[in-house]
Image (cartoon, grey):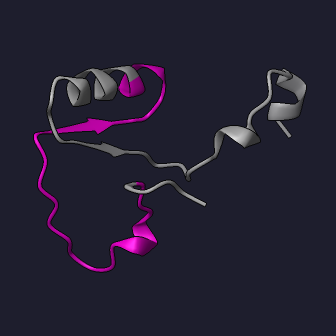
Amino acid sequence: MRPDGVFGREDLPGDTDLQCDAVVVGTGAGGGVIAAELAEAGLDVIMLEEGGYHDTSEFTPQASAMIR
C-alpha cells in the first residue's frame, strides 16, 4: 500500500494537469535529497520515477537478498 500523496500511472488516467513548484526526475539518493530540501523550503514538489513503489519493509541490508 502506498502512502498518501504517492500515485502510480494507473491512478491518473488520461491527460492530467498537476500543479507544483518543482519537478524532480528520479527518486534515488540524489533525487530524494533534493526533493526533501525543496519541500522543507516550502516548495510543492512532484517526483517522477520509472520504477514502482516499494515500501521500506521490502528492503534489507543483505545485498544477496535484494537482487532476488
Please tell me which residue is depicted at 17% across the width and 41% down the height of the picture: 44
Q: Is residue 46 left or right of residue 66?
A: left
Q: Position of residue 7 (x, y in %)?
A: 41, 61
What is the quadrant of the C terminus in the image?
top right
Left or right of residue 19, residue 53 in this image: right
Q: Is residue 62 above or below residue 52?
A: above
Question: Quadrant location of residue 24?
Answer: top left
Residue 28 lies in the magenta-colored region: yes
Q: Please name the residue shown 54% across and 57% down the image.
A: 2
Relative to 14, say whether 30 is above or below: above
Q: Quadrant of the N terminus?
A: bottom right
From the viewer's side, name the closer residue of 41 and 12: 41
Residue numbers of the magenta segment: 6-32
Report the side of 10 relative to 21 (left or right).
Answer: right
- Indicate whether 37 appears above or below 59: above
Please state if 36 lies on the left or on the right of 4 as rendered: left
Residue 57 picture location, percent across and down = 73, 41
How far from the left and from the top, in percent, is residue 28? 48, 28
Residue at 14% x, 34% y: name it: 43
Where is residue 45 drawn, in percent x and y?
22, 40
Asked if residue 19 is among those painted magenta in the image, a careful observer would answer: yes
Q: In this view, which residue lies farthest toward the bottom?
A: 14
Residue at 32% across / 42% down in the picture? 47
Quarter assignment of residue 5: bottom left
